[in-house]
Every structure is written in C-alpha cells, then in structure tokens.
Image (cartoon, helix red, strand yellow):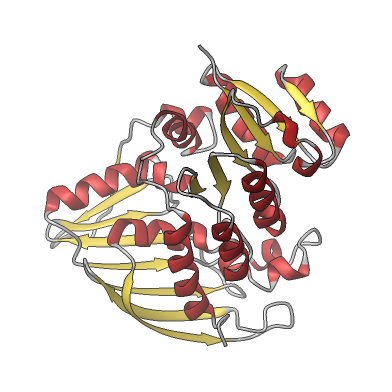
Amino acid sequence: MSKKVVVVGSGPMAEEYIKVIKALGQEAVIVGRNKDKALLLSNKYSCGGFGGGIEANTGLLDKDVELVIIACGVESLSDAACCLLKAGAKNILIEKPGALDLKGLLAIKSHMTNDVCLKVAYNRRFYSSVTALRNKIEKDGGALGCMFDFTDREKDILGAERLPEVVKRWGFANSTHVIDTAFYLIGMPESLNAERAEPIPQHPRGTSFAGSGRTNACIFSYFATWQGGGRWNVEISTTKGRYRLCPLEELWFCAKNQFGWEKIELKDDDDIKFKPGLFNMVRSALEDKTNTMLPSIDEQITFCKVIDRMFGYED
C-alpha cells in the first residue's frame, strides 16, 4: 500500500525528490509558493500540486501523510519547518543544513515534541562511495587521520541568483555538504583550530580556510580556497593505506608504501538513476524513523556550532 509524501518546494531539488518517491511506489503531493511551478511538476509526474506555500496548505497534513520533505530554499527551511511542526507534522526530512544559522535551528527545536522525528537530509551520507568507505574504515581497524577540502568555485558562490544572506553564510549553507561527510566518517571534533583569510564584501569572514583538530577517532585537517582552484575532496588513512573521495561519488585507494591510486568499483545503480544518495535516504526515512544515519536537530545544532567556529560566524 502506497504512502503519501508531501514535498514542500517546487524547484530542482523538489523534483529530484519526486522522482524518487514515484520510483518507490509512493504517492507524492507537491506544495510550492509558486502555483505555476507546482502545477507544472504535478502534471509532469501525475501527482497533486498546490501553490501558496505550506502556510496556506496545512490542511494537507492529514493522518495519511507518512513523511514531509522540506526542499525549499535554504533561507526558507526554518520557517517551513516551524510551520509544519505547529500544524502537527510528525515525520520530517528537511534539506541540509536545516536552517541558515543557529537561531533558525533553535527555532525548529522549540516547536518539537517527543513524538516528532525530524532528520536533516545530508544525502551524501548515503552515497555508495561513502557507504563503502565507512565499511572499509571499520574493516581496517579505524581511521588514522583525515583531511578534506571544501573548495567551491567562486562563480557558483557569487552567482546572480544567490541571496546576499545565503552567500554571507556560505560555509553553513553549502560547504557543510562535504564537511558533514568527513565528520560522519570520523566523528565530530573534540578540539579544533581554525584560520581564515582573504575576506570579500559578500563573505567578510574570508574565502581561504585552514584548520586542524581531533575527533574521538583520529586527527584531521582541512583546507579550502574559494577564490582559487580545487574541488571537494575527502581523504582518510588507515593502516592499509589511504582512501579518497574525489569526486565524492567515487572511491579511490592508495595502498600503504605505494604511490598509485586505484579506483574501487561500486554497486551504485541507484546513484546513477537518481540524484546520488537520494533513493536510499528517502527509503530509509520512510521505513525506519529510528535510523541514526542522518543527524537529528540536536546533532545539527552541535554541528552548526562547529561550523560557526570554522568560519568565524560566532564572532
């Protein structure tokens, strides 16, 4: 028997979720602010579509709704979540990073009750490459060290469609895609040293970042230059050698005492058919509300505080 899933948002990310929901044999309902965009998607995927935003459509949250996915712009995530919680939604998957800042996350928490399951949708945790690496680390006896790079392209950060308030907190709004992946694999920092340089008016906290620290598992370091070149990268060493996620969808291995990198073949059919990680993440949210693979609101609040230290947002 199919389950009803409400998707809040009508942009590209919402469409990716709808593809997965339909493939899973579930009933999708789209709620967007722009009625025309919502109806365009509803016609394309043969599902319900409504405009006016979730504020005007809380009546859709009946007992038959199994899951609500919030896939609107990052600047609207917190408000949408608070509205849904006040309307009685009990199972929510909210797009990363859940809010634009700590204040937004705390607002979400203030509306939560003990019977609510809310998870932050870091779909990269469900990449075939990340799952394989997690298994490799465990099999090898744990991580010895980690380094990661969250360099974004300057043209993407300063694109014409970016809202100033989003660019000003780009480290949390977007860089957490890769930072979360690294800390998911090695644990959250117990100590952290952070350096920043090269500020620009749009992001006055800097565009070059370097730092290091320690988690319960191992030591780590990071580096990024938004005004320079580079790309997202996560490397983790074990006693067997070093593993690399670059691009994050691929897993490479360099054996100890060697220089050459070998690509590890993955069973990633779902990551090819759909936006990587999304199929298994949505299936998990539907089947197991106790799943700990995605962060809770409390875990995301802790993560946000780490990000604020890394980027100087707490100053």
- Please give left or right for residue 159 compared with residue 151 in the image: right
Q: Is residue 244 above or below residue 277?
A: below
State the image quarter where residue 193 is shown: bottom left
Give the left or right position of residue 288, taking residue 135 as reference: right
Residue 29 in percent (x, y) is at: 69, 26
Up-down: is 236 above or below 311? above
In the rendering, at what x and y percent does residue 58 appear?
Answer: 73, 37
For image coordinates 82% across by 27% down, the residue present is 40
Closer to the camera, 145 or 240? 145
Horizontal and vertical percent for residue 194? Answer: 43, 84
Q: In this rendering, is residue 200 above or below 118?
A: below
**Residue furthest out toward the top:** 1
Look at the image and tell me in which quarter the C terminus lies.
bottom right
Q: Residue furthest right?
A: 36
Q: How many marks?
A: 0
Residue at the (62%, 75%) spot, across then down: 227
Work out whether residue 228 or residue 220 is closer to the camera in this orientation and state it.
Answer: 220
Q: Position of residue 55 (x, y in %)?
A: 78, 44
Give the quadrant of residue 280: top left
**Residue at (68% x, 65% y) in the render:** 157
Q: Is residue 35 left or right of residue 157?
A: right
